[in-house]
Amino acid sequence: MEVVVYGVLYLMLCVISALIFNTNKSRWLKLLLCIVFTPFLAFYILKYLQRKSDARVTHYICTRCHLEFTQEAEYCPICKREGIETKLIVQVMEQIQ
């Protein structure tokens, strides 16, 4: 319900600002369309950039027990519990979307 109220309020503010800031009678519709669609364009761009940045995942692989971790660590936590400090191999993998 709140989304509808905020959406209607936003559209009213768009119409008012388009009518206030128009310099030519034929330009107010173009200005209104730009104001209305700017948030949707920004949302699309942010989602697109988020997909690009999430495309890589770093895996840390133990050379002794061959377990994979996604949490950054220098030594394998499983081997460290056993008293052996085994360095992890860093491998960057691409995610398929």
Image (cartoon, rainbow, N blue to C red):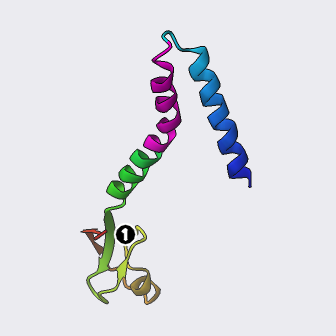
Q: Nearer the viewer, residue 52 or 1?
A: 1
Q: Nearer the viewer, residue 64 or 56?
A: 56
Residue occupying image coordinates x 26% and y 83%: 63
Image-based side of 97 in relation to 28, left or right: left
Q: Is residue 25 above or below residue 49?
A: above
Region in magenta: 25-42
In the rendered structure, does residue 40 fall within the stretch colored magenta? Answer: yes
Residue occupying image coordinates x 32% and y 67%: 58
Image-based side of 16 in relation to 71, left or right: right
Residue wearing tag 1: 74
Residue occupying image coordinates x 37% and y 69%: 74
Residue 62: % across, % down: 30, 81
Are there few (<14), some (14-19), or many (20+) residues within 10 Å of tag 1?
some
**Which residue is situated farthest in the top direction here?**
23
**Which residue is situated farthest in the front direction here?**
26
State which quarter of the image contains the C terminus.
bottom left
Image-based side of 70 in relation to 31, left or right: left
In the rendered structure, does residue 58 fall within the stretch colored magenta? Answer: no
Q: Is residue 97 above or below residue 76?
A: above
The residue type indicated by label 1 comes to Glu
Q: Is residue 20 above or below residue 74?
A: above
What kind of element bears circle 1? loop
Q: Main secondary structure of the magenta part?
A: helix
